[in-house]
Every structure is written in structure tokens, then in C-alpha cells.
């Protein structure tokens, strides 16, 4: 059995946003999820149950519901993003311990998300983490092709001049770590801590035993603090 990749060589730290930089149990994504359902319902003029089925089908097939709505129904990305990210961010609380752990990592810290920069900014502001990141690659920079598409990771690596063999990726969806691992990145799956209820699809919580997952943690702050990478 091949041992997991280490962190000693890492000079670029890449983080997903939702359910990664804040705990799953905050269920902030549940608000976005509900807004997506409303958007699908209104756009396609279908009932809530049918809209829910369409939403989840597109999510699994296209990587995001938005990609499916754009491809099959001509939806404007700007309209979609503005609608679904209009949520209450107040459940998020400042996390100075996580900020300190991120600050101590040696090298660049970047965010790679299927959300928008506006959503990233709102989340980081609530968490008090805005000053700790050197760049954001969002769904717009990805030309609306979401993770786990290989071209999205390659564009991210190119745009930010990242050597994947010297980078690590933190994600809450195991399927989004497959391509990064193939490209040479060290991969870390961030899972719920198991003490609080989370609102997720069963398949979203799978994959912690996958070969492309080097590490699994239910405590991102503690995991980062345990890495001996002083600046």
C-alpha cells in the first residue's frame, strides 16, 4: 500500500470554501440549496418536488445545477449566482484559531470554489479570514465549468502558476479530489465532526476511503495546527 503524500514539500495550500472553511453543521449550504430549488422551480415553471429532482440530477451530472441550467435551459450565470447566493450569512462566526493556523502555513493560500467571488468575500468576512488568502479562483474564472472537471483544475493551476506536485487541496467532496490527486497534489478530505446534524446527500459524504484521498479530518483547524510549517 502506497503511503499518503506528505506536506514537507508544499508551498501552495488550496482550499475549497463551502463546508470546508466552515463546519458542515452550520448548514449554510442548505440555504443556497433551497434558493437553487426556488430558481429551478421558477425558471422551469415546475412544482417543488420536480424542481428538486432536476436540481439534484443536474448537480450530479454537471458538477453544479447552474451548469445544467445554463447548458440545457439557457440560464444566465449572473442571474443564477445573484439569486442563489442571496442568503443569511449570520450563522457563520469568526474563527480566529483557524486564521492563526492558516497564517502559519508556509507559502501561498488560495481558494478554489464552484461559488462566486462575492460569496467567497461574504463568507470570509464573517469568518474573519479575508486577509489570509492570496487569491480566489471561482466559477466565473473557471468559465462556468465546475469542479470536478479536469479542465477547471488545469486552468486554476495555470492562472495561479501552481505546481501541483508542491500543492495540497482541502475539500469536503471526495470526488473533487480525484483530479487534484492525479495531477500530483496532496489531498485532504474535510468531513463532518459527527457530533451535530448535517444536511447533505448521502453520496456527498462518501469517499473517505478512496485511493485518491491522502488524509481525512473532521477538524480542519486542528489538522492545520498540527502541521509544522512556521512562516
Image: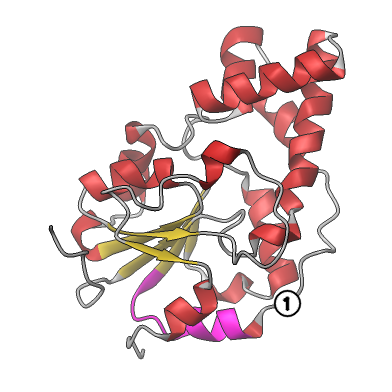
Specify whether 99 is left or right of 146. Answer: right
User: Which residue bears the numbered disc 1?
Assistant: 94
Q: Position of residue 143 (x, y in %)?
A: 48, 31
Q: Nearer the viewer, residue 212 or 84?
A: 212
Q: Position of residue 31 (x, y in %)?
A: 80, 45
Residue 194 occupies quadrant: bottom right
Q: Quadrant of the C terminus?
A: bottom left
**Figure check: 128 above or below 55:** below
Q: Residue 71: which quarter of the image?
A: top right
At which x and y percent is residue 225?
Answer: 45, 85
User: Would you say residue 77 sits in the magenta stretch?
Assistant: no
Q: Any magenta on residue 101?
A: yes
> Where does the magenta region start and end?
97-108
Asked if 165 appears above or below 137 in the picture, the reply is below
Residue 98 horizontal side relative to residue 211, left or right: right
**Residue projecting furthest to the left:** 1
Amino acid at each position: 500500500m502506497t503511503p499518503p503524500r506528505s506536506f514537507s514539500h508544499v508551498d501552495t495550500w488550496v482550499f475549497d470554501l463551502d463546508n470546508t472553511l466552515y463546519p458542515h453543521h452550520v448548514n449554510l449550504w442548505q440555504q443556497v440549496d433551497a434558493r437553487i430549488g426556488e430558481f429551478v422551480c421558477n425558471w422551469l415553471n415546475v412544482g417543488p418536488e420536480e424542481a428538486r429532482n432536476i436540481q439534484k440530477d443536474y448537480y450530479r451530472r454537471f458538477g453544479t445545477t447552474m451548469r445544467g441550467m445554463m447548458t440545457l435551459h439557457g440560464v444566465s450565470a449572473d442571474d443564477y449566482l445573484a439569486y442563489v447566493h442571496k442568503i443569511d450569512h449570520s450563522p457563520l462566526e469568526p474563527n480566529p484559531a483557524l486564521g492563526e493556523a492558516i497564517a502559519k502555513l508556509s507559502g501561498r493560500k488560495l481558494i478554489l470554489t464552484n461559488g462566486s467571488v462575492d460569496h467567497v468575500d461574504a463568507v470570509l468576512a464573517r469568518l474573519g479570514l479575508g486577509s489570509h488568502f492570496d487569491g480566489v479562483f471561482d466559477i466565473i474564472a473557471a468559465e462556468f465549468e465546475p469542479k470536478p472537471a479536469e479542465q477547471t483544475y488545469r486552468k486554476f493551476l495555470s492562472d495561479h502558476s501552481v505546481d501541483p506536485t508542491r500543492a495540497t487541496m482541502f475539500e469536503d467532496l471526495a470526488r473533487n479530489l480525484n483530479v487534484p490527486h492525479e495531477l500530483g497534489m496532496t489531498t485532504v478530505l474535510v468531513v463532518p465532526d459527527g457530533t451535530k446534524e448535517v444536511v447533505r446527500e448521502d453520496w456527498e459524504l462518501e469517499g473517505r476511503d478512496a485511493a485518491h484521498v491522502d488524509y481525512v479530518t473532521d477538524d480542519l483547524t486542528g489538522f492545520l495546527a498540527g502541521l509544522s510549517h512556521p512562516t
